[in-house]
Structures are given as structure tokens and as C-alpha cells.
Amino acid sequence: MHEEQYTRCPGCRTIFRVTPQQLAIREGQVRCGHCHTVFDGNVNMISLAPQPRTAPAEGEVDEAALGPPTVTLRSAQALKPAVPETPPESTEPSDRNEAIDEIAYEERFAWSQRGKKRNRRLAGLTAAAVPLLILLLAVQVVIHFRDAVAAHWPTTRPALMRLCVGLGCTVRPLRDANGLAIDASDLQADPAHKGLLILTATLRNRAPWPVAHPNIELTLTDSQDQPVVRRALSPNEYAGGTADLASGIPANGEAPIKLFIDASATTQSGYRLFLFYP
């Protein structure tokens, strides 16, 4: 039987009964089961038998003078082999994963908050931009159809004219060929000038708003009603000097036409008139 051996914890001074097999594990490194201090069991071996008294070295405690230890013994099972400390990375994977999960959650939460703030800002900008875009679209439509707007709603003409001053556009009489008709026309030779023809006609505006003066296409025909010569006449060529081209033909009004045509180089038997806008 092996002689009983004892070792003492340097931390709490607790004495443990140990065996050689226990001390052989981890080269004698053990952990106190009382205060959890890790110490070398071989170095801290003690004997409970009375020791001969010798003079202690300077600074050392004379344990013989103190007598045998009176601390209650603990069994060898209370002394555990020291477990070597491992880096936190290998001993606490769950803690690390929890920390990573927490960081990821915080990042997701922060991203979600940033996304919500960005969405709120975007919604605010959209709410402010939509009415502005609708207004700009309405202005663009009004400018594009300004002649029709001014014709159908005459009270808007002054505002449209002021708006066009800044935009560099003009408000003109509406071009409405369907509202125009030729009430009467005649083509006669001028008795005072050989080869000269006199064209007279009356343009009637049947629309309830002013209509722009149209262009007139005059076609001279032969006896077989085939075109001999064709010419397009602008309002500046056929309208009289007193005609107000900027205001157009008044609503339900008329515009007289008298035009001299040199036909000395042609022979014609008839004519045709056609109204159009270029």
C-alpha cells in the first residue's frame, strides 16, 4: 500500500489527500475544489507527521512551531486535474455565434430602419412631385392646344398671351377647315386688260369662334376639266389690306376675296378652288 500523501492549496490553505496516479495526470497540475486555484500538487506536498524543529530561513514561516495543520482534510475527489485554458475562440463557439447573430440582427435592424427612413423620404418626394408633374403636364397640354383653348374659352386668351410672352410662342386663330366654306366665287376676264383674270369669292366662317385665314388652291382647267395650271395663294396674297389676319375670320363672319391673275400664257375654260392649311 502506498503511503498517504497530502498537498496543500496555496490559495485557501486547504489540504487534500492525493495519490501518485492523480498527480501523474497533467504533470501534477491540479485545481482546488474549494477556491478553484490551479497549483502544482507536487511542489505543494506536505507531511502531517511531526517534523524536527529547525531554524527557519529568514522570511520563512516556522510551520513546526505552529504545530500540525488543523484544516479539515478533503478527499482526493475534491481535487480536480487542471484543465488547460484554451483560447476563447475554441471554448466559446456558441457565445461567438450569439455575438455574430446579435451583430447581424443589429445590422439588419439598422438596415431596416435606414430602409424605412429612405422609403419615407421617397414617399414624401413622390407626394410632392406628383402634383407638380401633373401641373407641368397640364401647362404643356394647354400650351400645345393654346389656339383651341383660346377659341373655345375666349376669357383665357389674355392669360395665354402673357404666358406665351415668356415662352416665345403666339396665340393664333384656330385652324378649322371644317368651319369654312366658299359661299360664292367667280372668275372673269378683265375687259380693260387682255389676258388678265379677276377672281372674286366670299369665305364664310360657320364656327362659333374665330378661324384663321386658310390658303387657297386655284386650279385653272381646260374644256375637258383637266388641270392646266395650279397655284396656291396665301392669305397675304388674296386678303385685302384692311383684313386683320392676326384675329382671323370672326365667328359666323365672312371674308371677301378679290384677286387679279395673269393668265396670258394659258388657255382655260374653268377653274376650281380648294381651302387648306399648310
Image: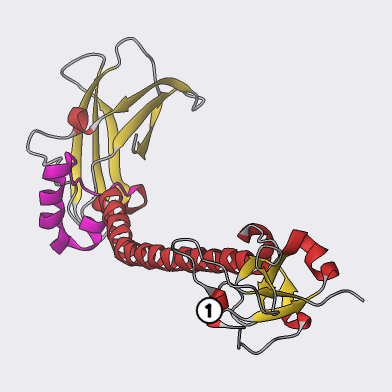
Left or right, 235 with respect to 166, comes to right
- The one nearer the camera, 50 or 46, is 50
Residue at figure coordinates x 15%, y 40% from the top left: 245
Left or right, 145 with respect to 117, comes to left
Q: Point out the image quarter for the N terminus.
A: bottom right
Residue 105 percent coordinates (x, y):
54, 68
Residue at figure coordinates x 49%, y 69% from the top left: 109
Tell me the crowding category of disc 1: few under 14, some 14 to 19, or many 20 or more residues within 10 angstroms, Cα based.
Answer: few
- The residue carrying mark 1 is 65
Residue 66 percent coordinates (x, y):
53, 81
Residue 245 shows in this picture: yes
The residue stretch that appears in magenta: 149-176
Q: Quadrant of residue 23?
A: bottom right
Residue 253 percent coordinates (x, y):
19, 54
Q: Quadrant of residue 50?
A: bottom right
Three-letter amino acid code of the residue under disc 1: Ala
Tell whether position 144 is magenta: no
The image shows residue 159, relative to residue 1, as above or below, that is above
Q: Quadrant of residue 135?
A: bottom left
